[in-house]
Image (cartoon, grey):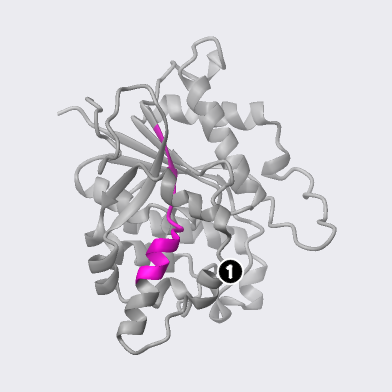
């Protein structure tokens, strides 16, 4: 049997556990080789878990995030590679402060693209996942993740580009992660109401930017992966400094999620092979 390979490109450690994690665990379980490539070290991530907001954590956030990522990869069963760029941080304030010197979002695109091309040519994935042009959320590293991924998808297949970065490899398909869906949130909110409880999504649903609703019309591919939601949550919790175990990520019972929304959603962004949409498998149409 020839093997299938999936590469998931993410901006920060923890992004892999909140976007498409159950899909990865499922493919690993089915014998697919899955590799997460994390572009930055997440050095500028805020400590979002009050229990981890300790002086000894602040001094060594970089080392701690390396350990957390290793643990999450182990839980999901994926291979992992750091691409070695430095977190740009989420600029806040009015006017926005300039991005910190040397950060990932300021690295010339050709330089970051070459590094990802090298990684693609080495692992030779059939499918690559990344973020859409809005980054899924407007963090400069997420938008850059999109730009680098799309540039590397093209360049990795082109023997004229980066000839020193390995033998050309043509990735068959690229998908965007689309986990943040109004319909999904509404389904859970309604279930809380049916059970006589107030759901945690009221403010999200009320403030929803109609622009983001277009995501519903962009989805091409829903992957059934309910069996792996528990693994997804464990991987997310492994990022202990970044994730408050009391956050809304964990308030919807897994049994409801399995019943009401057993899939993870994707948008097919590029394909070098013929496809029939909609699909329920990222590898549909690919012969290894
Ligand atoms: Zn991120």
Viewer-side residue, 120 vs 145: 145
Q: Quadrant of residue 195?
A: bottom left
Which range of residues does the magenta coloring cover?
A: 174-187
The residue beneath circle 1 is 207
Q: Would you say 36 lies left or right of 76 here?
A: right
x 44%, y 16%: residue: 168
Residue 274 versus residue 212 in the image, above or below? above
x 55%, y 48%: residue: 11
Q: Is mark 1 within 8 Å of ligand 1?
A: no
Residue pushed farthest bottom?
196
Residue pushed farthest right?
95
Q: How far across and down, in percent of the image, does residue 23 sit?
A: 31, 50
Residue 3 versus residue 57 in the image, above or below? above
Q: How far across and down, in percent of the image, does residue 155 sit?
A: 52, 20
Q: Looking at the image, can residue 252 be seen? A: no
Viewer-side residue, 253 vs 187: 187
Viewer-side residue, 26 vs 207: 207
């Amino acid at each position: 049997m020839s093997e299938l390979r999936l590469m998931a490109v993410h901006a920060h450690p923890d992004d892999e556990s909140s976007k498409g994690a159950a899909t990865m665990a499922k493919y690993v379980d089915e014998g697919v080789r899955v590799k997460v490539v994390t572009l930055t070290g997440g050095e500028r991530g805020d400590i979002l878990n009050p229990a981890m907001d300790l002086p000894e954590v602040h001094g060594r956030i970089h080392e701690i995030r390396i350990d957390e990522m290793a643990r999450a990869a182990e839980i999901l069963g994926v291979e992992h590679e750091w691409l070695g760029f430095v977190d740009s941080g989420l600029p806040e304030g009015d006017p926005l402060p300039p991005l910190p010197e040397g950060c990932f979002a300021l690295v010339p695109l050709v330089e970051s693209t070459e590094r990802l091309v090298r990684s693609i040519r080495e692992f030779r994935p059939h499918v690559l996942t990344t973020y859409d042009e809005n980054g899924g959320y407007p963090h400069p590293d997420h938008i850059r993740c999109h730009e680098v991924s799309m540039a590397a998808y093209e360049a990795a297949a082109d023997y004229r580009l980066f000839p020193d970065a390995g033998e050309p490899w043509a990735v068959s398909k690229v998908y965007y992660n689309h986990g943040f869906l109004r319909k999904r949130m509404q389904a859970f909110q309604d279930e809380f109401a049916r059970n006589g409880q107030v759901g945690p999504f009221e403010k999200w649903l009320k403030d929803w930017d109609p622009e983001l609703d277009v995501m519903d019309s962009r989805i091409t591919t829903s992957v059934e992966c309910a069996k792996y939601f528990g693994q997804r949550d464990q991987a997310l919790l492994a990022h202990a400094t970044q994730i408050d175990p009391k956050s809304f990520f964990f308030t919807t019972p897994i049994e409801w999620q399995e019943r009401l929304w057993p899939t993870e959603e994707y948008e097919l962004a590029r394909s070098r092979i013929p496809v029939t949409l909609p699909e329920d498998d990222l590898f549909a149409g690919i012969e290894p």
